[in-house]
Image (tube, helix red, strand yellow):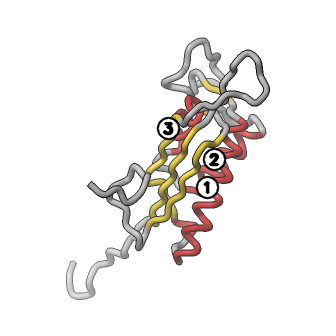
Amino acid sequence: IKMTSNYSIQDYNKDNMARILGKDLSISAKKSIEVCNFLRHKSTKQAKIILENVIVKKQAVPFKRFKMEIPHRSPGLGPGKYPIKVAKEFLRLIKEVEANAQNKGLDTNNLIFKTLVANKASRPFHFGRQRRTKMKRTHVEIVVQEKAKKEDKTKRPGKK
């Protein structure tokens, strides 16, 4: 069996997709998973606005999986947090994947997240610590797809 890449997506189409893989990012895996679940199936334009609002604490990310003892942040949202460090890394990765898409000739105003995955990475020890504390590391994979343009379904002149 020959492995061609370390990406989780199998049906990658080079014509209308772009991807990026952030390896060993020093962010929390649990918070990254919640951000991925929140941004999945949104456009990159929406995601950038959401993440900028999270950074300035205007909008919280709803936590649905890792939500023990987390307070509700706004009415109707449920348990949520403001993962600022994660939001900054995701914003950087989204800008980079848009640059990859632009380099391929895709329309950057028309991109939707096809895959958004966060996985735990290896956890090395902090340098110089005596307590043997480990660092947080996460792998993040982002695949965007150009949304298909809708064709006009106008009636033909001879038919009613």
Q: Which label was assigned to residue 90?
A: 2
- Tell me: 78 left or right of 131: left
User: Residue 3 appears at what percent x and percent y?
Assistant: 35, 56
Q: Secondary structure at mark 1?
A: helix
Circle 1 residues within 10 Å: few <14, some 14–19, many ≥20 = many
Residue at the far top: name it: 69
Q: Earlier in the sequence, mark 2 or mark 3?
A: 2
In the picture, the quarter occupied by the N terminus is: bottom left
Q: Residue at x 48, y 56 (%)?
A: 143
Q: Nearer the viewer, mark 1 or mark 3?
A: 3
User: Residue 22 appears at what percent x and percent y?
Assistant: 58, 50
Q: Secondary structure at mark 2?
A: helix
Q: Residue at x 20, y 82 (%)?
A: 159
Residue at the far left: name it: 159
Residue at the far bottom: name it: 158
User: Residue 102 appears at what percent x and percent y?
Assistant: 58, 72
Residue holding disc 3: 119
Mark 3 residue type? Asn
Q: What distance separates the C-alpha of mark 2 from that of mark 3?
A: 14 Å
Q: Pointer 1 and pointer 2: residues touching (CB < 8 Å)?
A: yes
Q: Earlier in the sequence, mark 1 or mark 3?
A: 1
Q: Residue at x 48, y 59 (%)?
A: 144
- Tell me: 101 left or right of 89: left
Q: What distance separates the C-alpha of mark 1 from that of mark 3?
A: 17 Å
Mark 2 residue type? Phe
- Tell me: 83 left or right of 128: left
Query: Looking at the picture, does residue 87 appear above or below residue 93?
Result: above
Residue holding disc 1: 94
In the picture, the quarter occupied by the C terminus is: bottom left
